[in-house]
Amino acid sequence: MRSSSKQGNYSFYYYVQLEIFEKLLQILTSQLIYVNIFFRKKRRKTWIHDLNLLREHEGEFHTLYRQLRQHEERFYIYFRMPIECFDDLLDLIKGDIKKECTNYRRPIEPVERLAVALRFLATGDSYTTIGHSFRMGFSTVSDIVKEVCDAIWKRLQPTYMPEPTKEMWEEIILGFNETWQFPNCLGSIDGKHITIKCPNNSGSKYFSYLKKYSIVLMAIVDHNYKFICIDVGGYGKNSDGGIFEASAMGRKIADGTFSIPADRSLPSQNELTPCVLIGNEAFPLRPNIMRLFPYRQSREDYRKEIYNKRLCRARRVVENAFGILAQKWRIFLRPIQVKVETTISIVKAACILHNYLRSTNSGMRFEHYKDVNIYI
């Protein structure tokens, strides 16, 4: 009996020691793999690439910027805004994008940082293309674009896209009635799919019915093609109605906390009617959301056909606003191949710049400048 019990204890200790040895072997193997990867990683040979050392002599900004300021039309084509708007924008965000000087190297000046970001928005070129043109590192261009876009949104949003008040809604209602002959209209609502590169490990969340990967820009637009409020970042697979109801502006409208004016009567009517947003068939019919009558009903009723015609004409402003945005900032004409977080910052910056430039009527004096090969 003793020998059998002693033999059992030996086998138990043997298995315990074997398990401990296997665990130690696994830890040692993982450490060796980590060390191997660390030493095999390509080390940076130089702090600044040889091409980038010539930035202040051969970079696109240093060779072209001063010459562009002497030609207003070419400056407008290059930066998509007049000189005075560029200078005002630089004054607003200069403190947010300025870097401190160190003993190692001089920082890139705020004016050059703004030029890089605007050129990226205006062309949609990759970071590598912008980096080669401006003689900058590719990661430097990436950081500049993100920082400048965040600074633009931070400084311009309180002025050019504030949360609507009753006074603002009243101006918009009056504008829709006078311009588009649609009374009690708070704005036109729709979503735009922003094409992106498929994010890693995202599954089908960003894959839309357009057979591409995208995030959704949900916007309410006024009678003058300006964005009243936006929501950026919705998954491409979701419907416009679902994204709107889940957004902050959709919840505020549903809760009645969006400062919407009180109900009022339509022209030549005595019955009170709510003020409404107008959208397409993707949005649900709500007390504050109107959409088209179905085609079968409008075909049989002349009054419904006239109503559909008026609503389509007024609703078109949101489609036109998206078109103006894409033609001004060409980055929306191709897939945006950056991180989703950076894409959201880019879209927000482009929308607030759209409002800023429309508020200043910046492009009016350049309407006479036409070229068959250039679209301003």
Image (cartoon, rainbow, N blue to C red):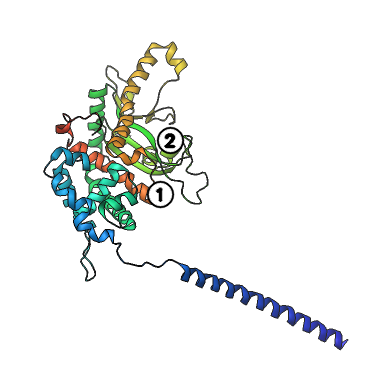
* Quadrant into which the N terminus falls: bottom right
Dot 1 falls on a residue whose secondary structure is helix
Question: Mark on residue 240?
Answer: 2
Q: Secondary structure at mark 2?
A: helix
Q: Position of residue 159 (x, y in %)?
A: 21, 45
Q: Is residue 258 visible?
A: no
Q: Residue at x 17, y 31 (%)?
A: 369
- Kindly identify which residue carries mark 1: 340
> To which quarter of the image does residue 4 belong?
bottom right
Q: Residue at x 37, y 40 (%)?
A: 334
Q: Is residue 244 left or right of residue 317?
A: right
Q: Residue, x 44% and y 11% (percent of image)?
A: 300
The residue type indicated by label 1 comes to Val
Question: Residue 71 placed where, x, y %?
Answer: 13, 41
Mark positioned earlier in the residue sequence (1 or 2): 2
Question: What is the crowding at mark 2: few (fewer than 14 residues within 10 Å), some, or many (at least 20)?
Answer: many
